[in-house]
DNA sequence: AAGTAAATACCCAGAAATAGTGAGAATAAT
DNA sequence: ATTATTCTCACTATTTCTGGGTATTTACTT
């Protein structure tokens, strides 16, 4: 009997996957969580074999959850649920030793199969996912080192993404426009993007907006 | 017995919601579709009372599906499934006479209730959704008239959002950079946004990327 | 105490975007 | 066939962004 913890910020998805898994006698959904924080809390008191984890969540995303898990030394097999082939994440996931990754548009069979495999400690990455991994590794520039942004930089990214220009940001933060320039410059360089568009793109893909 | 057609680009969601609805004896999921086009095809041959429609889909989104439905004169009650409170859509949905709208993070009970209401022709909009509607109506600037973008403009938005600058876009499309300038100018004005950041933002919020 | 990271500020020069106008061709629609 | 829309191109002027530096203060680390 494989004990599963479901984590997704959408109740419908949780209910849905629960229903799917109910039909399978070898799998039992022991609990669920709507947030990453809640998932971590529940993992401390509840013994589970596999955590089925949505990657796109507000506040604390899937990757952060896994990172915390490792930090706390909680041993559990992780199967990530992704919406799209978000190539940026994939590399980080593999580095974090996540056992598996499965697209939300895969069917019931694939899901059950994946959970079974992962519960045995085996690795499962859907073809689509591994393909997109190679895609991402080609774009070394961007994902080369996991980006370390400072608080101030994140703050500025958000303001840029909300259509403010350099002067407006400077006024809002009570700092010189030169400073904002410097920050923006550093951000572009850290993210390895060419321009404002790339910056806003990053903001969206990483739930900063 | 309420006959339901499920439309979502993620098989897991379809399977999940199917499972949820199976438990309810008054609702029967007669078919499902992974794309908007497929949904339209199936609606021509299959009698359904309610179509449960995901709004975020590649290629043809939920709004376009409804528009086509109206055009073809197919009468069916529409219940929209949304991920977030995407305020921009809401106004359009109401204008299109969509019966209801429900967030994906609502539970089993709400879902069943909503389907029942909608099947009776009654209107259901979750509190969150109506709230966000009023929010959006305040921002008259942006949503004042539903934006009508041309094919070329959409093409250019996508290229801008992928970090290309004016000259690069001009080369790629074999047109003058002046033309690209003009398009960008028109786009900014149509969307009512201030700059590139707003444009990329729009692209993301409307699944153009 | 020395070293490092973060936040701050400044300068310069070139590239790119934005705003305002105007206008000719190609298509689609009626 | 006439209109309307879309797509196209051009010019000017101004603002904003981008990339190359350098440098100081503060705070935290070792």
Image (cartoon, coloured by chain):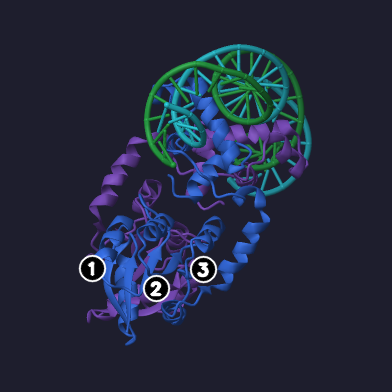
Chain colours: A purple, B blue, C green, D cyan
Q: Nearer the viewer, residue B176 or A109?
A: B176
The correct choice, above or below, for B184 with respect to A201 in the image is above
Q: How far across and how far down the image is residue A79, in percent?
A: 33, 63
Query: Are discs 3 and 2 less than 8 Å apart at CB?
Result: no
In the rendered view of the protein, which quadrant contains the C terminus of chain B?
top left
Q: Residues within 10 Å of mark 1 (few under 14, many from 20)?
A: few
Q: Earlier in the sequence, mark 3 or mark 1?
A: 3
Q: Position of residue A10 (x, y in %)?
A: 45, 69
Give the structural element (helix, strand or loop) at label 1. loop
Which label sits in the foreground, 3 or 2?
Answer: 2
Callout 2–callout 1 Cβ contact below 8 Å:
no
Disc 2 target residue: A14
Badge 3 crowding class, 10 Å Cα cut-off, few under 14, some 14 to 19, many 20 or more, is some
Residue bearing the label numbered 1? A120
Task: Say few, some or many: other residues with alpha carbon within 10 Å of mark 2 (under 14 / 14 to 19 / 20 or more).
Answer: many
Q: CA distance from mark 3 to mark 1?
A: 26 Å
Left or right placement of residue A108 versus residue A56 in this view: left
Please, is residue B115 above or below residue B150 in the view? below
Secondary structure at numbered mark 3: helix
Q: Quadrant of residue A1?
A: bottom left
- Protein chain holding label 3: A
Q: Earlier in the sequence, mark 3 or mark 2?
A: 2
Image position of B13 (left or right of A175):
left
Q: Secondary structure at mark 2?
A: helix
**Relative to residue B121, is residue A200 drawn left or right?**
right
Q: Which mark is residue B177?
A: none
Q: In this figure, what is the number of numbered marks? A: 3
Q: Which residue is mark 3?
A: A37
Seen at 27% across and 61% down, the residue is: A106
Task: Tell me which numbered mark, 2 or 1, is placed earlier along the sequence.
Answer: 2
Quarter of the picture containing the N terminus of chain B is bottom left
Residue displayed at 23% across by 62% down: A122
């Amino acid at each position: 009997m494989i004990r599963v913890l479901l984590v997704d910020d959408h109740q419908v998805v949780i209910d849905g996957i629960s229903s799917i898994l109910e039909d399978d006698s070898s799998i039992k959904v022991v609990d669920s969580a709507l947030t990453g924080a809640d998932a971590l809390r529940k993992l401390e008191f509840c013994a589970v074999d596999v955590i089925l984890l949505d990657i796109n969540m507000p506040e604390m995303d899937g990757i952060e959850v896994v990172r915390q898990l490792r930090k706390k030394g909680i041993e559990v097999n992780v199967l990530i649920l992704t919406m799209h082939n978000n190539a940026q994440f994939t590399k980080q996931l593999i580095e974090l030793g996540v056992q598996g990754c499965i697209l939300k548009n895969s069917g019931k069979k694939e899901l059950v199969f994946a959970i079974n495999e992962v519960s045995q400690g085996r690795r499962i990455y859907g073809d689509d996912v591994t393909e997109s991994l190679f895609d991402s590794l080609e774009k070394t520039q961007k994902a080369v080192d996991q980006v370390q942004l400072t608080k101030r930089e994140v703050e500025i990214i958000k303001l840029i993404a909300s259509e403010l220009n350099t002067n407006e940001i400077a006024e809002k933060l009570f700092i010189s426009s030169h400073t904002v320039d410097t920050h923006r410059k550093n951000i572009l360089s850290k993210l390895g993007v060419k321009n404002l568009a790339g910056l806003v793109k990053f903001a969206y893909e990483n739930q900063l907006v």
